[in-house]
Image: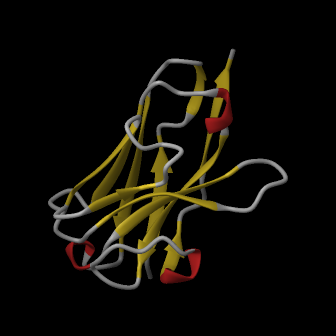
Amino acid sequence: QVQLVESGGGLVQAGGSLRLSCAASGLTFSSYAMGWFRQAPGKAREFVSVITSNSGGRYYADSVKGRFTISRDNAKNTVYLQMSSLKLEDTAVYYCAKAGGKFIYTRTDSFDAWGQGTQVTVSS
C-alpha cells in the first residue's frame, strides 16, 4: 500500500522560505514521477510542480515558476519542494502525489496516490 507523508509546512512571513518534504513507502519510488499540488480554502486543488522519475525533467505552474524548486532523492524515497519568496496567495494545504507513470503530468487524474497534506500559511 502506497503511503505519502508530507512535512515541513507552517507559518511564514511573506518573502520567506519553507521546504516541504514527502516521504514515500510501499512503492518502487524511482519508477514514478512525483508531484505537488495545493488547495486554498474554497478553491479547487491546483497543480504546483512535477518531477520525472529520474529527475531529468521538472515542470512548474506559472504562479510559482522562479520561486519554487522541486527535487527528489530516490535513495531516500523522498520528494521536496523548496519554496522561496512566498506570497500571501501561496497560502494553502500542499499535497504530495504519486503519478501513474515516469514523465511530466499536471492533471490531478494522472496521479493515483496522495498524501494527507500539510498547511502552509503566509502572513503579511
Q: Residue at x 40, y 85 (%)?
A: 100
Nearest the camera: 57 or 26?
A: 57
Identify the residue at horizontal 42%, vertical 43% (top origin).
65
- Is 19 placed above or below 109 here? above
Instruction: Using the image as rendered, state which of residue 45 and residue 60 is in the foreground.
Output: 60
**70 relative to 13, above or below:** below
Residue occupying the point 53% across, 27% down: 86
Quadrant containing the C terminus in the rendered view = top right
Image location of residue 87, percent across then percent down: 59, 27
Q: Which residue lies furthest to the front in this view?
A: 62
Q: x, y percentage for residue 71? A: 27, 50
Observer-nearest residue: 45 or 5? 45
The residue that appears at 27% across and 79% down in the rendered structure is 102
Q: For residue 68, which quarter of the picture?
A: top left
- Answer with the quarter of the image where residue 10 lies: top right
Up-down relation of residue 11 to residue 98 (above or below): above
Q: Where is residue 57 in the image (x, y as percent from the top left)?
A: 23, 63
Q: Is residue 66 left or right of residue 114?
A: left
